[in-house]
Image: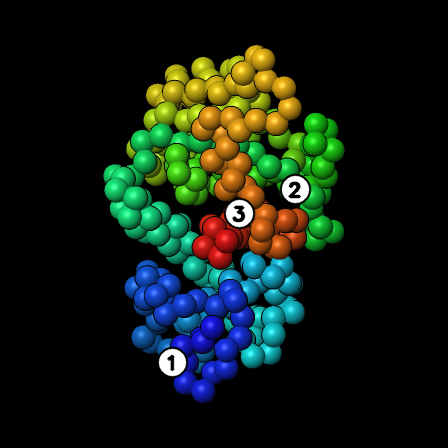
Amino acid sequence: MSSGWPDAPDRYPSDLTDAQWELIEPLLPEPNTGGRPEKHPRREIVNAILYVVRSGCPWRYLPTDLPPWQTVYWYFQQWEQAGVTEALLTELRIKARRQADRADEPSAGIIDSQSVKGADTVGRDSRGYDAGKKVNGRKRFIITDTTGLLVTVAVMAASWQDRDGAKTALLSAYLTTPIRHVFADQGFAGRLVDWARDTLHTTLEIVRKPADQRGFSVISRRWVVERTLAWLTACRRLARDYERDPAVSDGDHPLGCYTG
Protein backbone atom coordinates (compact mmCIF):
# COMPACT_ATOMS: atom_id res chain seq x y z
CA MET A 1 0.00 0.00 0.00
CA SER A 2 1.54 3.31 -1.01
CA SER A 3 2.06 6.08 1.53
CA GLY A 4 1.16 8.60 -1.17
CA TRP A 5 4.43 10.55 -1.01
CA PRO A 6 6.99 10.79 -3.84
CA ASP A 7 9.62 8.03 -3.89
CA ALA A 8 8.13 6.38 -0.78
CA PRO A 9 8.06 2.56 -0.84
CA ASP A 10 5.04 0.43 -0.11
CA ARG A 11 5.23 -0.19 3.63
CA TYR A 12 2.67 -1.06 6.27
CA PRO A 13 -0.94 -2.31 6.20
CA SER A 14 -1.84 0.35 8.78
CA ASP A 15 -0.87 3.20 6.40
CA LEU A 16 -3.72 5.43 5.29
CA THR A 17 -5.13 4.91 1.83
CA ASP A 18 -5.62 7.96 -0.38
CA ALA A 19 -9.37 7.83 0.31
CA GLN A 20 -8.83 7.68 4.07
CA TRP A 21 -6.39 10.59 4.01
CA GLU A 22 -8.85 12.64 1.97
CA LEU A 23 -11.37 12.22 4.81
CA ILE A 24 -8.96 12.88 7.66
CA GLU A 25 -6.78 15.73 6.36
CA PRO A 26 -9.43 18.49 6.60
CA LEU A 27 -10.13 17.59 10.24
CA LEU A 28 -6.56 18.14 11.43
CA PRO A 29 -5.65 21.53 13.01
CA GLU A 30 -4.07 24.10 10.74
CA PRO A 31 -0.25 24.30 11.04
CA ASN A 32 1.16 27.19 13.04
CA THR A 33 1.97 30.03 10.67
CA GLY A 34 4.33 31.92 12.99
CA GLY A 35 7.11 29.33 13.25
CA ARG A 36 9.20 27.26 10.92
CA PRO A 37 7.44 24.96 8.43
CA GLU A 38 6.58 21.48 9.65
CA LYS A 39 9.40 19.07 8.85
CA HIS A 40 7.30 15.93 8.42
CA PRO A 41 4.17 15.53 6.29
CA ARG A 42 0.98 15.29 8.33
CA ARG A 43 0.05 12.05 6.60
CA GLU A 44 3.26 10.41 7.80
CA ILE A 45 2.55 11.51 11.36
CA VAL A 46 -0.90 9.88 11.23
CA ASN A 47 0.58 6.75 9.64
CA ALA A 48 3.06 6.50 12.50
CA ILE A 49 0.34 6.85 15.16
CA LEU A 50 -1.76 4.16 13.48
CA TYR A 51 1.31 1.91 13.25
CA VAL A 52 1.73 2.08 17.04
CA VAL A 53 -1.94 1.32 17.72
CA ARG A 54 -2.17 -1.55 15.25
CA SER A 55 1.20 -3.22 15.88
CA GLY A 56 1.36 -2.63 19.64
CA CYS A 57 4.97 -1.49 19.62
CA PRO A 58 6.26 1.12 22.11
CA TRP A 59 6.50 4.68 20.78
CA ARG A 60 10.30 4.45 20.96
CA TYR A 61 10.26 1.41 18.66
CA LEU A 62 8.77 3.15 15.65
CA PRO A 63 10.57 2.11 12.43
CA THR A 64 13.17 4.56 11.20
CA ASP A 65 11.36 5.15 7.91
CA LEU A 66 8.59 6.87 9.89
CA PRO A 67 9.05 10.26 11.60
CA PRO A 68 10.97 10.26 14.94
CA TRP A 69 8.91 8.89 17.82
CA GLN A 70 9.33 12.08 19.86
CA THR A 71 7.75 14.09 17.02
CA VAL A 72 4.94 11.59 16.54
CA TYR A 73 4.11 11.46 20.25
CA TRP A 74 4.17 15.26 20.49
CA TYR A 75 1.62 15.53 17.67
CA PHE A 76 -0.51 12.81 19.25
CA GLN A 77 -0.62 14.71 22.55
CA GLN A 78 -1.34 18.05 20.88
CA TRP A 79 -4.15 16.62 18.77
CA GLU A 80 -5.65 14.83 21.77
CA GLN A 81 -5.74 18.07 23.75
CA ALA A 82 -7.38 19.80 20.77
CA GLY A 83 -10.08 17.11 20.56
CA VAL A 84 -8.98 15.96 17.11
CA THR A 85 -9.54 12.24 17.80
CA GLU A 86 -13.10 12.87 18.98
CA ALA A 87 -13.79 15.03 15.92
CA LEU A 88 -12.49 12.27 13.63
CA LEU A 89 -14.60 9.68 15.44
CA THR A 90 -17.75 11.77 15.10
CA GLU A 91 -17.21 12.65 11.45
CA LEU A 92 -16.48 9.10 10.37
CA ARG A 93 -19.42 7.75 12.37
CA ILE A 94 -21.75 10.22 10.66
CA LYS A 95 -20.47 9.23 7.22
CA ALA A 96 -20.93 5.52 8.00
CA ARG A 97 -24.47 6.11 9.30
CA ARG A 98 -25.39 8.06 6.18
CA GLN A 99 -24.17 5.21 4.01
CA ALA A 100 -26.50 2.93 5.99
CA ASP A 101 -29.42 5.36 5.45
CA ARG A 102 -29.53 6.30 9.13
CA ALA A 103 -29.81 9.67 10.84
CA ASP A 104 -26.51 11.44 11.44
CA GLU A 105 -26.76 11.14 15.21
CA PRO A 106 -27.88 8.04 17.11
CA SER A 107 -30.75 8.17 19.61
CA ALA A 108 -29.96 4.78 21.17
CA GLY A 109 -26.74 3.14 22.25
CA ILE A 110 -25.29 0.05 23.91
CA ILE A 111 -22.86 -0.01 26.83
CA ASP A 112 -20.41 -2.66 27.96
CA SER A 113 -17.12 -2.94 29.81
CA GLN A 114 -13.93 -4.90 29.30
CA SER A 115 -11.06 -5.46 31.75
CA VAL A 116 -7.55 -5.74 30.31
CA LYS A 117 -4.24 -6.47 31.97
CA GLY A 118 -2.00 -3.52 32.64
CA ALA A 119 1.66 -3.57 31.72
CA ASP A 120 4.36 -2.52 34.20
CA THR A 121 4.12 1.00 32.76
CA VAL A 122 0.61 1.41 34.25
CA GLY A 123 1.02 3.02 37.68
CA ARG A 124 -0.71 1.97 40.88
CA ASP A 125 -2.79 5.14 40.97
CA SER A 126 -4.67 4.18 37.78
CA ARG A 127 -4.85 0.39 37.96
CA GLY A 128 -6.81 -2.06 40.06
CA TYR A 129 -7.96 -5.66 40.38
CA ASP A 130 -11.17 -6.96 38.81
CA ALA A 131 -12.03 -9.87 41.12
CA GLY A 132 -14.72 -11.19 38.78
CA LYS A 133 -12.47 -11.40 35.72
CA LYS A 134 -9.29 -11.92 37.77
CA VAL A 135 -7.55 -9.14 35.87
CA ASN A 136 -5.07 -6.65 37.30
CA GLY A 137 -5.07 -3.55 35.13
CA ARG A 138 -7.67 -1.21 33.70
CA LYS A 139 -11.29 -1.38 32.66
CA ARG A 140 -12.67 0.31 29.54
CA PHE A 141 -16.30 1.32 29.32
CA ILE A 142 -17.59 1.93 25.81
CA ILE A 143 -20.88 3.07 24.34
CA THR A 144 -21.64 2.35 20.69
CA ASP A 145 -24.60 3.14 18.48
CA THR A 146 -26.87 0.26 17.53
CA THR A 147 -24.63 -0.65 14.58
CA GLY A 148 -21.53 -0.99 16.77
CA LEU A 149 -19.85 2.31 15.88
CA LEU A 150 -17.96 3.78 18.84
CA VAL A 151 -19.58 6.80 20.50
CA THR A 152 -17.61 7.27 23.72
CA VAL A 153 -15.03 5.51 25.88
CA ALA A 154 -13.89 5.85 29.47
CA VAL A 155 -10.81 4.14 30.92
CA MET A 156 -10.31 3.62 34.65
CA ALA A 157 -8.92 1.12 37.15
CA ALA A 158 -10.22 -2.42 36.72
CA SER A 159 -11.42 -2.39 40.34
CA TRP A 160 -14.33 -0.09 39.43
CA GLN A 161 -17.71 -1.81 39.56
CA ASP A 162 -19.72 -1.61 36.34
CA ARG A 163 -22.56 0.24 38.06
CA ASP A 164 -20.18 2.99 39.19
CA GLY A 165 -17.70 3.23 36.32
CA ALA A 166 -20.44 3.38 33.69
CA LYS A 167 -21.55 6.80 34.92
CA THR A 168 -18.63 8.53 33.21
CA ALA A 169 -19.39 6.94 29.82
CA LEU A 170 -23.12 7.59 30.15
CA LEU A 171 -22.56 11.22 31.11
CA SER A 172 -20.21 11.71 28.14
CA ALA A 173 -22.80 10.27 25.75
CA TYR A 174 -25.49 12.46 27.30
CA LEU A 175 -23.44 15.64 26.87
CA THR A 176 -22.23 14.99 23.33
CA THR A 177 -25.03 13.05 21.60
CA PRO A 178 -28.84 12.80 21.59
CA ILE A 179 -28.66 9.23 22.95
CA ARG A 180 -31.37 8.82 25.58
CA HIS A 181 -31.89 5.05 25.47
CA VAL A 182 -29.03 2.68 26.29
CA PHE A 183 -29.07 -1.12 26.28
CA ALA A 184 -26.90 -2.96 28.82
CA ASP A 185 -26.33 -6.39 30.33
CA GLN A 186 -27.41 -7.35 33.84
CA GLY A 187 -24.08 -6.24 35.31
CA PHE A 188 -25.37 -2.68 35.00
CA ALA A 189 -28.71 -3.37 36.71
CA GLY A 190 -29.74 -1.81 40.01
CA ARG A 191 -29.16 1.73 41.20
CA LEU A 192 -27.46 2.76 37.94
CA VAL A 193 -30.81 2.41 36.15
CA ASP A 194 -32.37 4.87 38.60
CA TRP A 195 -29.39 7.25 38.37
CA ALA A 196 -29.53 7.33 34.56
CA ARG A 197 -33.27 7.99 34.63
CA ASP A 198 -33.22 10.68 37.33
CA THR A 199 -29.95 12.45 36.47
CA LEU A 200 -29.58 12.03 32.70
CA HIS A 201 -33.22 11.46 31.73
CA THR A 202 -31.90 8.38 29.94
CA THR A 203 -33.51 4.95 29.87
CA LEU A 204 -31.04 2.19 30.72
CA GLU A 205 -32.67 -1.01 29.47
CA ILE A 206 -31.24 -4.24 30.87
CA VAL A 207 -31.15 -6.99 28.24
CA ARG A 208 -31.15 -10.31 30.07
CA LYS A 209 -30.40 -13.79 28.86
CA PRO A 210 -33.45 -15.97 28.16
CA ALA A 211 -34.32 -17.97 31.26
CA ASP A 212 -34.11 -21.26 29.36
CA GLN A 213 -30.80 -20.55 27.61
CA ARG A 214 -28.24 -23.36 27.66
CA GLY A 215 -24.74 -22.83 26.34
CA PHE A 216 -23.70 -20.02 24.02
CA SER A 217 -26.31 -17.88 22.33
CA VAL A 218 -26.19 -14.49 20.64
CA ILE A 219 -28.00 -12.00 22.88
CA SER A 220 -30.14 -9.42 21.15
CA ARG A 221 -28.59 -5.93 21.14
CA ARG A 222 -25.65 -6.90 23.34
CA TRP A 223 -23.72 -8.75 20.62
CA VAL A 224 -23.16 -5.46 18.77
CA VAL A 225 -21.07 -3.82 21.49
CA GLU A 226 -19.25 -7.10 22.18
CA ARG A 227 -18.21 -7.18 18.53
CA THR A 228 -16.82 -3.65 18.88
CA LEU A 229 -14.73 -4.72 21.88
CA ALA A 230 -13.38 -7.54 19.71
CA TRP A 231 -12.49 -5.01 17.00
CA LEU A 232 -10.55 -2.99 19.55
CA THR A 233 -8.54 -5.89 20.92
CA ALA A 234 -7.59 -6.89 17.38
CA CYS A 235 -5.24 -3.91 17.70
CA ARG A 236 -2.30 -5.14 19.76
CA ARG A 237 -1.92 -1.80 21.51
CA LEU A 238 -5.37 -2.35 23.02
CA ALA A 239 -5.10 -6.05 23.86
CA ARG A 240 -3.16 -4.90 26.93
CA ASP A 241 -2.93 -1.44 28.48
CA TYR A 242 0.54 0.05 28.25
CA GLU A 243 -0.13 3.76 28.75
CA ARG A 244 0.96 5.44 31.97
CA ASP A 245 -1.66 8.16 31.45
CA PRO A 246 -5.28 6.88 31.17
CA ALA A 247 -6.11 9.86 28.94
CA VAL A 248 -3.65 8.57 26.34
CA SER A 249 -5.30 5.15 26.55
CA ASP A 250 -8.67 6.89 25.98
CA GLY A 251 -7.32 8.33 22.73
CA ASP A 252 -6.01 4.97 21.52
CA HIS A 253 -9.50 3.45 21.39
CA PRO A 254 -11.05 5.57 18.62
CA LEU A 255 -7.83 5.11 16.64
CA GLY A 256 -8.19 1.38 17.16
CA CYS A 257 -11.63 1.56 15.56
CA TYR A 258 -10.15 3.35 12.52
CA THR A 259 -7.50 0.68 11.98
CA GLY A 260 -9.68 -2.24 13.00
Label 1 element class: loop
User: What's under tag 1, amino acid-wise?
Assistant: Pro
Q: Image quarter for residue 131?
A: top right
Instruction: Look at discs 3 and 1 and give the one toward the viewer.
Output: 3
User: What's under tag 2, amino acid-wise?
Assistant: Val
Which badge, 3 or 1, comes first in the chain's sequence? Answer: 1
Horizontal placement of 137 versus 105: left or right?
right
Please state the horizontal and vertical placement of residue 224, each as a whole percent of the image: 47, 35
Q: Name the residue under label 2.
A: 116
Instruction: Look at discs 2 and 1 and give the one toward the viewer.
Output: 2
Q: Name the residue under label 1.
A: 37
Looking at this view, is 222 or 119 the one in front? 222
Which badge, 2 or 3, comes first in the chain's sequence? Answer: 2
Q: Image quarter for residue 125?
A: top right
User: Gap between marks 3 and 1, in whole Å?
Assistant: 37 Å
Label 2 element class: strand
Q: In the rendered view, tell whether residue 235 sits above or below residue 1.
A: above
Q: Name the residue under label 3.
A: 231
Evaluate if marks 2 and 1 touch, with contact meaning CB atoms under 8 Å apart: no
Q: Residues within 10 Å of mark 3 (few under 14, many from 20)?
A: some
